[in-house]
Image (cartoon, coloured by chain):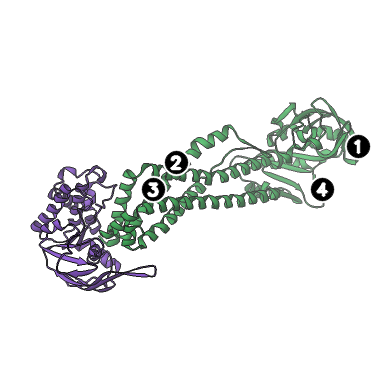
Amino acid sequence: MTRVGRSLRVAVFLAFKGLIRGNFGVTAMTILLMALIFVDVLFLPALIRGAVRTIDDQVINTVTSDLVITASAGAGTIDNPGALLAEIERTNGVRAATATTRVGTQISHGSESNAWSVDAIDPSSYRRVFTTPGHLIEGSFLRSADTTGIVLGVDVAGADRTHERTYSRSLKTVHAGDVVTVTLAGGVTRPFTVRGIYQNRFPLSDQGAFISDAAAAAILPGAPDRATAIYVKADAGVSSGALKVRLEPLRTGVNLQTPEQLTAAIQDQIDTFDLINNIMRAMSLLVAAITVFIITYVDLVNRRRQIGIERAIGITATAMVGSYVIKTVVNAIVGTLVGLAVFVFALTPFVQSHPFQFPNGPVTLVLDAQEAARNMGVLVAVAVVSVLIPAVRAMRMKILDAIWGT
Amino acid sequence: MIRVENVSKIYTLGTVKVTALRDVSFAVDDGEMVCISGRSGSGKSTLLRQLSLIDKPTAGRVIFDGLDVVSLSESRRSALRLDRLGYVFQEYALIPELTAEENVFLPAMMRGGRSRDYHARARSLLELVGLDARVAHRPKELSGGEQQRVAIARALVNEPSAIYADEPTANLDSFSGQEVMQTLTRLNAELGVTILFVSHDPDDGQYASRMIHLRDGELVDEPEPAG
């Protein structure tokens, strides 16, 4: 066996004996610290991933669906949307599609008035594409033949919810059953009875208002022949990108956009989250490094004489440094596994049942297994580097200085 | 054979230079049991450390089995300490996490070889020093004298040419001290291993085949008068 091989064998032996017979308190404290640091390293990325997933879900479920088709620049509206919808729905990978037409720009109630978009929709197909009809806090959703009803987002109606951030800009006191005045295209005003009020807990969609296609057709004769946008819901497992490729040949003169293309502003937020996340992770790893360094340094100072004696009887520096590295790696792996177990089996279920209420909706923790494994590797590597510095320094001391503690 | 030629050791403490050994020369034949005696501060432990390769002299040569060990690299000196020398410290110096048997076979494991062999050797050495019933005990479960005998067994495990013992009885009661010295004497007689031990106790001279006296870092012919 080579000298290095013998040193490694002694290193493993000393490390193993040190772990099972050494100071239990120090080992337990090291593992606990590593576990806490690992939970800290995992927490913020998981929270950010949860927040991003919430935003993604809210965008797809209430604003864009999986694909948005709009008229190309200059055209303004999509002509003959019914024919296009029929073709879209026949396409493989499409679960449902719905068209909307922007018909109104202002809603008033009493002395309160503000500019909000009002879209004409087909309630039955809209229900298959978006989840908004299921998020009513008052009343009911539109019916296809309803020509006098309107559904309002909570940020439009107000609904006496004075605690909502957008209350001051809303109609404040509107509830289901109340009548509001809508200013339609061409300046035509019509009264509509509020059938229901929805709350998606997502600012981009809670500012909407909907009337039925039938109502729009009754007031604006040309409305059924054009649409502002068509929204397409994909079958499970079909990506927006794949859907776009399949639908592009159906009609020229229209734009097909995925949710990612439409939410570039949100992507900026996500990038900022990532930056914060990286800074916090670096801080956590620094704390880990300093913690391991201090624990090892104190241990080495206390064992300086023993190190001198071991060197005096011929134990190599490689064996001694190796034993410290092995002990640290074991402690770091056990610590990170304990931290992972706490995160997966305690923290995540707790947050699942008590989600954080973010402005964009309830947020839970979403753990990425690959990132967790990578963070575990990084934490173990940081621990190894942190133990190497004091250990190698201790081995470079003169034997007598080590024995005498000078 | 160990030959010491004009060895001097000067420690520098800040701006002050302290001469611990001054031009010391002597030789020890194989199988001798030599006591290095002298008062506290006479340089006897310093001399032992130069011989046992734990420290390097400022001047002079130490020849061990024909090899000038002063000029060797630290890794060669470390290998020599492991393979050819045994060292017994004043304060037992056992590894607390290891049993008596494990403490003994650790240098043998470092040297290489089969696990079965060094386990057997450690057990036979512990039997030789009268601790065959204590193989599985850890240092904290042993008395001072027992720990020192474990340290002696450890010093012997790689079958060294020489054992260096630095005041091996200094921290022991008289009975345990006698046991340790008798153990060293018996090993010297039975195994023929060269033993150099340091003592400030004139009575320990009875165990040695020869005495070396040091006074203020210099070799003298006669021990310093008591008082």
**Mark 1, mark 2: which one is toward the viewer?**
2
Q: In the rendering, which numbered label is found on residue A338?
A: 2
Per the model, the C-alpha gap separating discs 4 and 2 is: 58 Å
**Percent coordinates x, y for residue A202 in the rendering:** 70, 38
Q: Is residue A131 above or below residue A330?
A: above
Residue for badge 4: A76
Image quarter hosting the C terminus of chain B: bottom left
Quick one: SS at disc 3? helix
Residue that badge 3 annotates: A330
Instruction: Tell whether A4 sits left or right of A264.
Output: left
Judged from the image, the secondary structure of the residue bearing numbered disc 2 is helix
- Say yes or no: labels 4 and 2 on the same chain: yes
Residue on which the image places disc 1: A188
Q: Total of numbered circles in the picture? A: 4
How crowded is the residue under tag 4: few (<14 C-alpha within 10 Å), some, or many (20+)?
some
Q: Position of residue B70 (x, y in %)?
A: 25, 71
The first of marks 1 and 2 along the sequence is 1
Tag 2: residue type?
A: Val
Q: Looking at numbered disc 1 in the image, what kind of residue is underneath it?
A: Val
Measured Cα–Cα span from mark 4 to mark 3: 65 Å
**Residue at left offset 46%, top offset 39%:** A341
CA gap between label 1 and label 2 equals 66 Å
Q: Colour of chain B?
A: purple
Q: Disc 2 to disc 3, how far (Cα)?
A: 12 Å
Q: Which mark is residue A82?
A: none
Q: Residue at coordinates 72% horizontally, 28% vertically from top-left?
A: A137
Q: Quadrant of residue A147?
A: top right
Which chain contains the residue that carries disc 1?
A: A
What tint does the image give chain A? green
